């Protein structure tokens, strides 16, 4: 029997909404309430809800002020304090690590953690000219997990290049160039990687897309698979067009034993770690690596007594293929092995900030089936910037949960200066082309000056756009005036 304060996950749930009648659609708050109730049923202990110390809601695109208090009221958790995270795909894992640590220290006994998005319903409403209205969830949470962080450099904002759909393909092209691949060979490889993710989604009962498109389908432009941002087609992007909710219930082994929750439901967070890379893309030393994944991910495995070879289950955060490739390299994982338990944000579904709650829930389900296995779930927020890791097992650890923040080690690493303007010629470091409804629309590129400073450039010139799409543009010399590419 583990220490009585050992943190465990005893209840999980996932749900999707496919309702076409707007009047019958549940909004995110309602989905969260339902998800928490389902997680309690999964623990075979509905009565656990009234005994919760805390209810935490993962921040979403909705504008509820204190949704956790509203969820607590709806589920009868009247003594529970409310908590909320901030925005970022890393915060599920970061908050879960903090919850597990608090339980191991006796500061908490039980927590319900939930989140939901309704991207499918919102998109359909907007196409029909409907204005969504949400329930009121006023107030201020009793506490927060994490902190709010500003994610874009002033230069990036002024240039209009701040969205993940703009920056991740720039990382992808930089990585392709660093690996010495042609654009054609590279597209084959990443489409095959994504096809393996699609195969996993086919076996995941909660996945949004289960028809397992082939690698050829994934890399071929079509009316259903339009180009978005070079080199990515739609099926290489996160699928935010989902209504999905999930919930986790964590508690101590002592609390679970008192409530009679059977041990075959228990899954153990073994260890966790987190750290941020340089937040602004402009100041990254390079665009093909992640020291935070290497350092914090490695520390998580060390604390859990594991290494890459001993992992049976892995879910790497998969907003875009480059995030998976960089994480696999930094953690020492073979790209050919299974790197997701869900199918990833394209095929399992990408409910924005809350995807990792689904990957944790699926990991719990699989570890209950094979308790001897060991798992690692990674989380990524911002532009490959904010990272959190947790190792899990279905069998009791020799010691209680351990956690480390590795931020001091990351803050000691070198960065680059970014220049606001440049007049002259430079070689392209990386680039992307954004597509509009009528085809290629805007090109973005970064270059490095002879003394190592980063320069941004933008263009809508059709000749440049063709050059960016027709061959390898990394290493090409371009003219820049201010922030505009010039022939």
Image: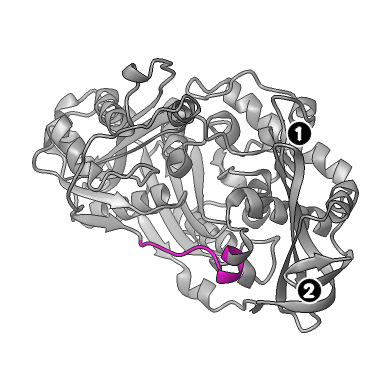
Q: Which contiguous range is marked in magenta?
A: 147-157
Left or right of 19? Residue 56 is: left
Quarter holding residue 278: bottom right
Give yes or no for residue 154 being in the magenta stretch: yes
Kindly give the residue lying farthest to the bottom in the view shown.
451
Left or right of 483? Residue 323 is: left
**Quick check: marks 1 and 2 in contact, CB under 8 Å?**
no
Q: Position of residue 265 (x, y in %)?
A: 32, 29
User: Which residue is located at x 25 percent, y 23 percent?
Assistant: 41
Residue closer to the observer: 421 or 281: 421
Q: Position of residue 58 (x, y in %)?
A: 34, 45
Q: In terms of sequence position, does the residue under pointer 1 or pointer 2 come before the other?
A: 1
Number of residue marks: 2
User: Which residue is located at x 37 percent, y 57 percent?
Assistant: 402
Quarter holding residue 294: bottom right
Q: Nearer the viewer, mark 1 or mark 2?
A: 2
Mark 2 — residue?
A: 481
Task: Report the quarter where the N terminus lies.
Answer: top left
Q: Position of residue 425 (x, y in %)?
A: 86, 75
């Amino acid at each position: 029997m583990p220490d009585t304060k050992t943190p465990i996950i005893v209840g999980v749930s996932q749900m999707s909404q496919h309702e076409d009648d707007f009047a019958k659609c549940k909004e995110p708050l309602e989905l969260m309430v339902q998800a928490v109730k389902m997680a309690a049923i999964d623990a075979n202990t509905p009565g656990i809800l009234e005994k919760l110390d805390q209810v935490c809601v993962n921040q979403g695109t909705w504008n509820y002020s204190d949704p956790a208090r509203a969820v607590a009221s709806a589920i009868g958790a009247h003594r529970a304090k409310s908590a909320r995270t901030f925005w970022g795909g890393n915060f599920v894992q970061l908050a879960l690590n903090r919850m597990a640590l608090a339980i191991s220290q006796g500061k908490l006994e039980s927590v319900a953690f939930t989140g939901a998005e309704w991207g499918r319903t919102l998109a359909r409403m907007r196409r029909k000219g409907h204005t969504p209205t949400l329930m009121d969830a006023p107030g201020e949470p009793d506490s927060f997990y994490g902190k709010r962080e500003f994610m874009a450099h002033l230069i990036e904002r002024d240039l209009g290049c701040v969205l993940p759909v703009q920056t991740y393909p720039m990382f992808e092209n930089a990585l392709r160039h660093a690996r010495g691949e042609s654009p054609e060979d590279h597209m084959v490889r990443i489409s095959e990687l994504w096809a393996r993710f699609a195969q996993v989604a086919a076996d995941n009962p909660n996945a949004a897309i289960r028809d397992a498109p082939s690698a050829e389908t994934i890399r071929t432009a079509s009316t259903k698979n339009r180009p978005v941002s070079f080199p990515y087609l739609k099926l290489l992007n996160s699928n935010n067009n989902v209504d999905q909710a999930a919930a986790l219930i964590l508690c101590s082994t002592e609390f679970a034993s008192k409530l009679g929750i059977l041990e075959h439901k228990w899954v153990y967070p073994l260890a966790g770690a987190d750290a941020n890379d340089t937040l602004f893309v402009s100041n990254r030393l390079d665009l093909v690596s992640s020291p935070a994944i290497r350092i914090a991910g490695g520390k998580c495995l060390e604390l859990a007594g594991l290494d890459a070879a001993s992992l049976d289950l892995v879910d790497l955060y998969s907003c875009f293929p480059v995030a998976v490739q960089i994480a696999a390299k930094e953690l020492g994982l073979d790209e050919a092995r299974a790197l997701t338990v869900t199918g990833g944000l394209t095929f399992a579904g990408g409910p924005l900030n809350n995807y990792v709650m689904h990957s944790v829930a699926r990991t719990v389900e699989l570890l209950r089936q094979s308790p001897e296995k060991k798992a690692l779930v990674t989380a990524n927020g911002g532009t490959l910037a904010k990272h959190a890791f947790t190792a899990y097992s279905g069998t009791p650890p020799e010691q209680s949960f351990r956690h480390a923040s590795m931020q001091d080690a990351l803050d000691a690493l070198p960065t680059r200066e970014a220049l606001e303007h440049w007049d002259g010629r430079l070689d392209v470091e990386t680039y992307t082309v954004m597509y509009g409804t009528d085809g290629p629309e805007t090109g973005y590129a970064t270059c490095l000056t002879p003394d190592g400073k980063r320069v941004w450039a933008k263009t809508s010139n059709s000749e440049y756009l063709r050059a960016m799409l027709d061959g390898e543009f990394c290493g090409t010399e371009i003219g820049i005036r201010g922030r505009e590419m010039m022939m």
